[in-house]
Amino acid sequence: MSETPKTPVIEFKDFQFQYFSQAEPTLHEINLTINKGEKVLLVGPSGSGKSTLGHCLNGLIPFSYKGEIQGSLKIMGQETKEMDIFQLSKMVGTVLQDSDGQFIGLTVGEDVAFALENDCVELESMKETVQKVTDIVDMGELLKSSPFELSGGQKQRVSFAGVMVDNVDILLFDEPLANLDPATGKTAIDLIDRVWRDQEKTVIIIEHRLEDVLYRDVDRVIVVGDGRIVADMSPDDLMSADILPELGIREPLYVTAMKYAGIKVTPDMHAGRLDTLDMEQVKAPILAWNGAQEKKTKPAERPVLLRADHISFQYTKKRKILQDISFSIHEGEMVSIVGTNGAGKSTLAKLICGFVREDKGKIYYSGEDMADWTIKERSKKIGFVMQNPNQMICKPMIYDEVALGLRIRGVPEEEIEPKVDRALKICGLSPFKKWPVSALSFGQKKRVTIASVLVLEPQILILDEPTAGQDYHHYTEIMEFLRSLNSQGVTIIMITHDMHLMLEYTPHAIVISGGRKIGDASAVEILTDEEIAEQANLKVTSLYELAVKTGIEDPSSFVQNFIDYERGARQNEDETV
């Protein structure tokens, strides 16, 4: 039986792009063909050029971001240089990382209908189309809701519907998982997969979270590094090559576990997805490795630094946000607060910082009731890095933004510069010291806000999604710095959707769901408890699933062994360096 001939819909030929503001090209010699009906994952470290590739596809280059183009890019057989952004928008629909930046209408229905209104579509036909596409993304019953009142996952679905009304052939997703909890992210990948199959679209996904995207079938993974295509292969072939670690891209955890067990990963193992992995080839080495691991002793418990005692809070009488929450955090701990989008995690952080005040209960710092502490008094002990960097940044230049807190506190200028330099270096921002904030990406802005709080040397540091939008290299840099701060006695609290961060860096995890605490234990215990994971929109780690599939009696012990082994391997690397 002969194969159906492939129809190219995207063709890069000797393509090069250089921003007018840059001295060197961002993209070099791109030769890439994507065929009709393919689902392609685009990965690469920050600054590799993958987002620039996406901008070339949807017309933001050259229409919004100016620069010099060499070579050819054809979409649906037409040279993009000879088209305008309106023509391209009828071929390529883009769902942005920041959904809020994509909304135009006051209601879901108005927002989805925007493109149809521009095309002067007749009202009845417009309503019918809007209902049809919102039903596809399971938002058909929320047409009268404001987009800004929706959860992260719902916002993304509205953006998705907004590009689907044009019936475009190509769908481009720019980091669709960046701001979603694990279970909502899984649902988003399911939705993309369903639309890809049912609507026969060509789908391109740009994403850091490789393992989460590979939860469903992908035809090819295209790896970008330093503005060039480093690899273009099937997931099975990619897992067999040592390309990802060399570029600082995180492999799926179960693949790393296989390598720790001494397994040479080969294409015939089908390791591209855990569901397709040939367990017969990996079972014996995994069991042997797990049995050989030594159990670690728990460190001695330190005094309690922060204690919440039966706190409750609500913004309005009808809307209870937090209900009867108690927990203790010890000096020098690293703790993750996890749970569903909208569970109340960020509100809990605001209560600790004093931005809002609890309706019931008390919060204690080193045994002292904080009820009468002002925000300024709390800020001397507690630093807070918000999820959205645009809500924190208030200076046009990066150096001034990071120095702001020190200047407000009256620190002499000669003492400020070395402190700012150190914070910028830690956050990978030294080359941008004299840059304007407006020139940075979302992820880089995130690092500016972390630097601006780190420079103040707080005793407790609370970070809301510290690694969202970061590649594995910058993620590791930030987390290793936080770990070094922690080793100096700073207590770190992280609100996160990143299950690997929770496992690797935070021995203690607090789980919030529906405004209530439903879990307070070690990260390993939480992420191997299927009931808690389901309740809180978490996702049991693929390490747990691998342990179950290989018949390990205590899967949680296997997960703990992996974390201990990885931590030991990293410490040995640091000592060698």
Image (cartoon, grey):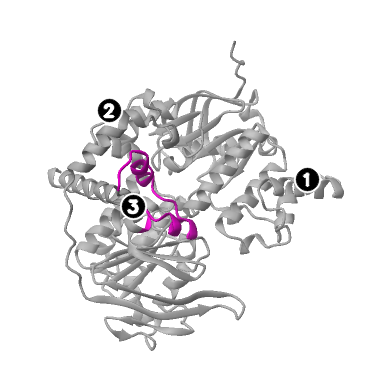
Q: Was residue 548 drawn as part of the magenta stretch in this picture?
A: yes
User: Between marks 1 and 3, how big is the CA–CA gap?
Assistant: 46 Å
Q: Is residue 416 visible from the viewing direction of this image?
A: yes
Say which of 93 and 52 sits in front. Answer: 93
Residue 409 image point, x, y percent: 32, 77
Q: Is residue 360 above or below residue 242?
A: below
Give the number of the mark in front: 2 or 1: 2
Residue ID at (62%, 20%) = 7
Determine which residue is flagged by label 2. Answer: 264
User: Between marks 2 and 3, how big is the CA–CA gap?
Assistant: 37 Å
Determine which residue is flagged by label 3. Answer: 429
Mark 2 nearby-residue class (10 Å; few <14, some 14–19, many ≥20): few
Residue ID at (29%, 56%) = 505
| Side of 183 relative to 385 (left or right) | right
| Side of 182 relative to 161 (left or right) | left
Which image quarter: residue 542?
top left
Q: Amino acid at mark 1?
A: Thr
Query: Closer to the N terminus: mark 2 or mark 3?
Result: 2
Mark 1 nearby-residue class (10 Å; few <14, some 14–19, many ≥20): some
